[in-house]
Amino acid sequence: MSEAATRTLQAPGRLAAPAGPASAGQIPPPLTPPHKGEGDFAAAMPRKTVDEWGLAETQPDPPPPCGEGLGVGVNPYAVTLPTRATLPPAFLVWLVIALALAWWLWSSSMPAEILTYWEDITYLAVQHIELVAWSGGLAILVGVPVGIVLSRPALRKVSEAALQIFNLGTTIPTLAILALSMSVLGIGTVPAIFGLWAATLLPIVRNTYTGLRAVPAHLVEAAHGMGMTPAQVLWRVELPNALFVIFGGIRTALAICVGSAPLVFLIGAGGLGELIFTGIALDELPMMLAGAIPTALIAVITDFVVGRLQFHLVPRGINPLR
Amino acid sequence: MIRLEHLTKVFGDPQRGVLAVDDVSLELPAGEICVLLGPSGCGKTTTMKMINRLIEPTSGRIFIDGRDTTQTDPIRLRRSIGYVIQQIGLFPNKTVADNICVVPDLLGWDRRKARKRAGELLELVGMAPATFLDRFPKELSGGQQQRVGVLRALAADPPVMLMDEPFGAIDPINREVIQDEFLRMQQTLRKTIIFVSHDLDEAVKMADKIAIFRAGRLEQFASPDELLARPANGFIESFLGSDRALKRLRLVTVADAMVAGHDAVRGDDPLDRAAELIRASGHPGVVAVDAEGRPEGWFSLPDGGGSTASRQPLRATVSTATDLRNAVALMFAHDMPLLPCVDDAGKLAGVLTYRSVVKSLATGAPE
């Protein structure tokens, strides 16, 4: 054995390595579990706090539910403009109007002249509201179910054709509808309510149908896949998600209804139209305004009330107003 | 357990319609994940939707735990199967709590019990119940929505789950995180899962079994390892890609590929012994261990063919539980043709060489 061979490894070329590099090269337990969830993931990947998630990844609000097809090309009134929940700009407009009105009240004898019709105003306003409530209420009661039925998959093929029938109700001038209604049902409250109802129906049917059709297909699929019955899918998923658009239709419809209601005086149903048309015929401005101003007020109040209902009844998760 | 027997679906006219699924039969044991994989339009989603009868089969039968699904009311059947879709499909009008409790509510569970379970589930994925239960889906990030979508399917504790590209809509980083999280949950939950995917890497990672579809036909049904080792035909081979051998690395652990019982040198051995052992083993080197058996260096012979082994620094070792993909990456990164493999105590368990890696891939999956 040579001298070199008898040298042990303990000699100058020592084997024992310095501890540092060895331990540095040692791989730690794998950071990502190699397969089937091995390893402690939570330890390897510290979870972000809620605040970090929230700040970094809050998504922008989704666009408001689709309102396309709201009678575009069919009825220029049937476009729903979402009103703002916070008022400042609108408030300024109202302030200006109120100031102008106050100045006018102060400076003319007109208010006193209008108020001479007070008894007529209250009586006819109640009649007017009753007409609107009946025709608007019936239009909602009929329009929403019809919209729901037309949106069912079984009726998809006929629904557009059917909607054209409802279009007739709005494209024919309200006056003509009332005349037609009178020629069949005679004069009085019943033909008036029928005529207003027919003129009011379309925006409600159209928006109910469009709102339901715009509910994303994957929501409906998920609902079916989790074992909802078709009725449960409608009540728990489709209607809540279409509610905002349906309400938009109801607001539009009621505004049309209140605005058209004075016409029913012409077929003998009374209402504030009595003051308006008589005032025009007699060239009596205060009398005409005694009918027109309350009509406008009823329209504004109705829209405000339905707007509040829309704000509070549509769930927060899908309500673009809140 | 899920068994499909000669499942066929023709859309439209039975004679001239579109054949979407063509005579598919497979059997998935309870507690396993089966990934249905294939290019789009291959019938994988249709196959999945026939299991909860969102699509009714034209012919063939499906058994869940031995019971024919056509004998069950489809509504009851679906409530007993968890369902996750690619678009997540959280109901925007409902809070997170109400979304998770959809199926428990349908089943008529006690409301408070269901909400409590929703909170527990949220904790499982690291989302604080107090913060999230009353939020609406639009107030969550994409990853959080995806998690809630999976929790919703788990809420009523169904034994079977159908997942249609559940992680398809998230960015790659979050997807990895959620996949790992899901696999960790699956380790304790042991659901029987049908999972639709078109992503091979995801399939290899998630699956116990992969079913590859083409034009409605089941081309191969095998474990990921077997699939990558022995693709049944040319289509599958090209679908898996020419780098399928590399994809297999992820499925093999160091313990399976290493050469065990490596004859190491000790500090007090003569230097000649190192050269002797290298020549005897045919390895590119020999590991040196300390008194406790922990690797502390390695020896190799000079390139020119000299007879004296020289000591090399120990730049890396690898745990036996690591997958080969990471191990090979270390061998490349640190230029170590001989990689010592250590057990949990840090003791030398074996060595990995390029040849042992190649050999473990070549021998293929166990039959």
Image: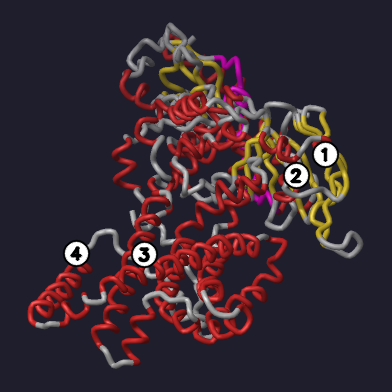
Q: Give the CA separation, mark 4 to mark 1.
A: 61 Å
Task: Evaluate whether residue A189 shows in this view.
Answer: yes
Is disc 3 placed on a helix, strand or loop?
helix
- Mark 4 or mark 3, earlier in chain: 4
Q: Amino acid at mark 4?
A: Pro
Q: At numbered mark 1, what does the secondary structure look like: helix, strand or loop?
A: helix
In the picture shown, does residue A170 fall above or below A234?
Answer: below
In this figure, which residue is indicated by the disc labeled 3? A302
Lateral position of residue A222 relative to residue A263, left or right: right
Pinpoint the chain carrying mark 4.
A
Give, as a three-letter code, the residue at label 1: Thr
Q: Tell us which disc is closer to us: 3 or 1.
A: 3
Residue B274 colored magenta? Answer: no
Question: Is B245 contained in the magenta span?
Answer: yes
Q: Which residue is mark 2?
A: B53
Give the residue at mark 4: A88
* Foreground disc of the pair 2, 4: 4
Magenta stretch: give its range. Answer: B239-263
Q: Nearer the viewer, residue B194 or A206?
A: A206
Camera-near label (4 vs 3) is 3
Q: Which is more toward the observer, B202 or B317?
A: B202
Q: Which mark is residue B297?
A: none
Amino acid at dot 3:
Thr
- Residue at mark 1: B70
| Real-space CA distance between mark 3 and mark 1, rounded to the nearest whole angstrom | 53 Å
Q: Residue at x 75, y 52 (%)?
A: B43
Query: Which quadrant does the N terminus of chain B fall into?
Result: top right
- Counting other residues with Cα less than 10 Å from the Cα at mark 3, is it few (<14), some (14-19), or many (20 or more)? some
Badge 4: residue crowd in 10 Å (few <14, some 14–19, many ≥20): few
Quadrant in the picture for residue B163: top right
Residue drawn 32% across the image and 34% down it: A49
